[in-house]
């Protein structure tokens, strides 16, 4: 795109584009976050689910705004809105900040316009949501003590304990990677089928 | 807190509300005692009643009571499957209640314009304020859009996996056009002007702000030390 050449910083138009696609990303994210409340297993697979479906807004934004800072702002806005609703712990804040910065670096190295570079950065960006269920492992003892104290039935506690095995930790990290790759390819297919024809990319 | 705000229809400085959001978050994640939690929720509910959100306060109070009832009565006596499926949801919902209450207050009593002016006063960079305000304002538009697309899909009888594509593609295309139109309008109105922006919104900390913040901070301190 030509506007990546004139001016490095984000202009008004880029900022508005980022804002709009962040809204769509947030809605998709939130829908799966709610689903994650139904059962702990869904919560652990949530980063993967989000990665599959949020690829389209992310890749479209990446195609529209080929400048540094776009991905970071998207993550920051998501974090801020979640912060306002009280769903953000320090763990997810750290995981999201670090993955967003890493995703920015990857985009910077691949000059912002290659599909491969954007996909890799999307996969990394998706990994940021891992921080949501991660406290289960990080504060395992605390967490189990807390829910026992809250009067949870013993078999529920043991179910959570079984879920927080190391194998599930691997699943937690692998699911957004696989989901991210699928999401990127879905986005690519839709780009080819619709968006290029419509002339918006 | 509610006692100190006897005046009807209290109005807070947006910055106070944002600070309250931070306080609510701190309390939510530091306290472990049920009574601290209940007191905090009741105080916040009184606060938003004083600000005029009576209906919302009623609904929130009902929801909070329902959560407590579920957690302490139904889950321990009802079927196990119910408990294991919904415990996380309910305890999570309970944790976010204070933030939800403050969030309701901000949503109902503070316009996006006031919020932006407040953020600008806090020296948040323009590069974050613009996309954030666009995001917040785009949610209702998105909801409307999805409603229309749903109706159209019903008419054409689209089912299954195709539904995903038929929903996402129009949303994306309309988002792109909106972005373009909106930025054309915003650039015309001088969004790229680097000069410090002026605002019609007047902002001043009043007595009620200081009082409520003081109570909030004291409460925060109690919950951190006692929890």
Image (cartoon, coloured by chain):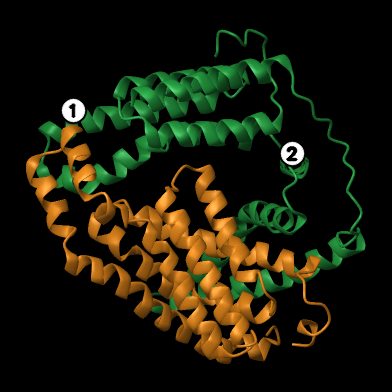
Chain colours: A orange, B green
Front in this rendered view, residue A79 or B50:
A79
Residue at x-position 30% and y-position 39%: B91
Residue B38, can we see it? Answer: yes
Secondary structure of the residue carrying numbered label 2: helix
Of labels 1 and 2, earlier in sequence is: 1
Q: Separation of disc 1 and disc 2 at Cα? A: 43 Å
Q: Which residue is mark 2?
A: B118
Residue at x-position 27% and y-position 45%: B88
Residue B9 percent coordinates (x, y): 67, 17
Residue at x-position 50% and y-position 22%: B44
Characterize the local packing of mark 1: few (<14), some (14-19) or many (20 or more) Cα atoms within 10 angstroms. Answer: few
In the rendered structure, the answer to whether residue B168 lies left or right of residue B84 reads right
Residue B117 percent coordinates (x, y): 78, 41
Q: Which residue is mark 1?
A: B73
Residue at x-position 23% and y-position 60%: A41
Front in this rendered view, residue A100 or A44:
A100
In which quadrant is the N terminus of chain B drawn?
Answer: top right
Characterize the local packing of mark 2: few (<14), some (14-19) or many (20 or more) Cα atoms within 10 angstroms. Answer: many
Query: Within the image, what quadrant is residue B180 found in?
Result: bottom right
In the rendered structure, the answer to whether residue B186 lies left or right of residue B114 reads right
Judged by depth in the image, the label closer to the viewer, 1 or 2, is 2
Disc 1 and disc 2 on one polypeptide chain = yes
Query: Within the image, what quadrant is residue B186 found in?
Result: bottom right
Compared with B89, B187 (above or below) is: below
Q: Chain of mark 2?
A: B
């Amino acid at each position: 795109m030509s506007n990546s050449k004139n001016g490095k910083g984000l202009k008004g138009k880029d900022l508005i584009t980022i804002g709009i696609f962040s809204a769509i990303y947030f809605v998709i994210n939130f829908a799966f976050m709610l689903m994650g409340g139904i059962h702990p297993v869904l919560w652990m697979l949530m980063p993967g689910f989000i990665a599959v479906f949020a690829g389209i807004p992310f890749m479209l934004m990446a195609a529209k705004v080929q400048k540094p800072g776009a991905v970071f702002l998207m993550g920051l806005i998501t974090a801020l809105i979640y912060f306002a609703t009280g769903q953000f712990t320090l763990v997810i804040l750290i995981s999201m900040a670090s993955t967003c910065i890493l995703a920015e670096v990857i985009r910077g190295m691949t000059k912002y316009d290659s599909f491969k570079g954007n996909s890799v950065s999307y996969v990394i960006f998706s990994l940021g949501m891992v921080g949501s269920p991660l406290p289960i492992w990080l504060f395992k003892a605390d967490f189990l003590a807390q829910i026992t104290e809250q009067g949870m039935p013993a078999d529920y506690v043991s179910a959570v304990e079984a879920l927080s095995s190391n194998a599930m930790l691997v699943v937690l990290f692998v699911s957004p990677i696989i989901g991210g790759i699928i999401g990127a390819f879905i986005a690519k297919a839709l780009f080819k089928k619709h968006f290029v024809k419509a002339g918006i990319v | 807190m509610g006692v100190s705000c006897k005046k009807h229809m209290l109005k807070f400085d947006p910055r106070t509300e944002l600070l309250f959001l931070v306080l609510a978050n701190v309390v939510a994640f530091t306290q472990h005692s049920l009574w601290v939690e209940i007191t905090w929720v009741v105080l916040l509910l009184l606060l938003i009643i004083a600000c005029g959100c009576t209906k919302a306060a009623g609904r929130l109070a009902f929801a909070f009571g329902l959560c407590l009832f579920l957690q302490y009565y139904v889950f321990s006596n009802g079927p196990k499957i119910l408990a294991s499926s919904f415990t996380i949801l309910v305890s999570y919902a309970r944790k976010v209640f204070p933030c939800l209450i403050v969030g309701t207050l901000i949503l109902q009593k503070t316009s996006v314009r006031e919020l932006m002016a407040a953020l600008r006063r806090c020296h948040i960079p323009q590069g974050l304020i613009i996309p954030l305000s666009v995001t917040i304002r785009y949610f209702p538009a998105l909801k409307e859009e999805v409603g229309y697309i749903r109706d159209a899909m019903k008419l054409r009888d689209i089912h299954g996996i195709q539904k995903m594509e038929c929903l996402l593609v129009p949303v994306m295309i309309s988002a792109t056009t909106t972005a373009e139109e909106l930025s054309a309008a915003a650039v015309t109105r001088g969004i790229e002007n680097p000069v410090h922006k002026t605002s019609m919104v007047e902002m001043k900390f009043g007595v009620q702000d200081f009082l409520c913040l003081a109570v909030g901070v004291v409460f925060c301190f109690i919950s951190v030390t006692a929890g």
